[in-house]
Image (tube, rainbow, N blue to C red):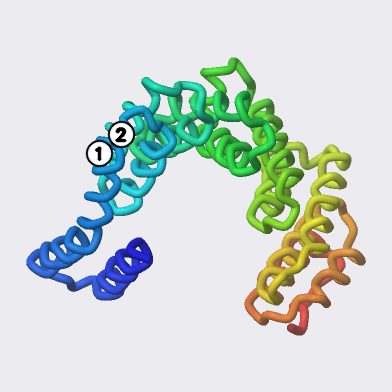
Amino acid sequence: SVLNEVNGLWKQANLYPSTSEKQWRELQRRVEEKVAPLRWDYEAYLRKNPLDYRAMTTYGAFLEDIGHGNEAMVWWSFAYNLAPHYPSLLNNMAGACARTGHPLPAIQLYEAAIRLEPREAVYHFNLGNMYCLFRKETAQLHGWKVNGVFANALEEFRLAREQDGSNFEYAISYAKTYYGMNFPPRHQFWKEAMAAWNHCLEMKLAPDQRDFVQVHLVRVSAYLRDPIAAMNHLSEIRNHDHRQAAARMLQNAFPDSFTSPLQI
């Protein structure tokens, strides 16, 4: 596809940090040359169908993908005037606001998209990320304390995981958010975190993903003051670097139990 070709060109350029300004201009020219026919087709269609807000939304996403964010917002604005309750459009506009440093409207747009389409996993995932990344803005917007921000982010990630149970990123985002809950003495939260990481372990995983989850299970076992469980999870890790990281966690958590370095 055109987008794959364009992404290939950008990727190739990014492999060479010494690319000169002249070379970048040439690359931009080549990109514009490749996308020009598709842009013409989109705009010809929209001239004939000026009320098709779905096509405007799709065209805006295409423009953003090729680096024309300002133009994308113009088309999304046209679409918004026609259909302010189209959730895909609100999600796209929210993403653009987030990327350009406007977190408050981004949060509000994601929340509006969810109210319209509560079963769309990616909307919940995007909103959960906004809550985590922009905790201060989220707290000001909703009047939440910091723990309330994390609790609501946790719920959004849970809903994303619930709607798309095969998505590893959604599952680990839910599990990782427990670290922000900030309640080390309260074992109930770490038990919930353990369950969340074990849920990840039950998914169809690549070896590196499985090791990643086991490292976190070592960490949570340490918070639960359970060195035996931590050792069991450590024994399941295959990657040497991951094993070393997990072993350091274990020794730091239980210095009296492991007085000499673990043999990895």
Q: Which mark is residue 71?
A: 1
Q: Which residue: 52% across, 39% down?
A: 133
Q: Quadrant of residue 153?
A: top right
Secondary structure beneath dot 2 equals helix
User: Residue 56's x, y, as percent?
Assistant: 36, 37
Secondary structure beneath dot 1 equals helix
For disc 1, the neighbor class at 10 Å (few under 14, some 14 to 19, many from 20) is some
Residue tagged 2: 75
Q: Quadrant of residue 120?
A: top right
User: Residue flagged by tag 1: what amino acid is it?
Assistant: Glu
The nearer-to-camera label among 2 and 1 is: 2
Q: Which residue: 84% across, 65% down?
A: 230
Q: Residue furthest top?
A: 143
Total marks placed: 2
User: Residue flagged by tag 2: what amino acid is it?
Assistant: Trp
User: Residue 80's x, y, as percent?
Assistant: 39, 24
Q: Which mark is residue 1?
A: none
In the image shown, does 74 or 203 lie closer to the viewer? 74
| Disc 2 to disc 1: CB gap under 8 Å | yes
30 lies left or right of 102:
left
The quarter of the rendered structure image containing the C terminus is: bottom right
Q: Which residue: 40% across, 37% down?
A: 57
Taking 204 as reference, is 219 above or below it? above
For disc 2, the neighbor class at 10 Å (few under 14, some 14 to 19, many from 20) is some
Q: Which residue: 37% across, 20% down?
A: 81
In the image shown, does 124 or 200 lie closer to the viewer? 124
In the image shown, does 3 or 41 lie closer to the viewer? 41
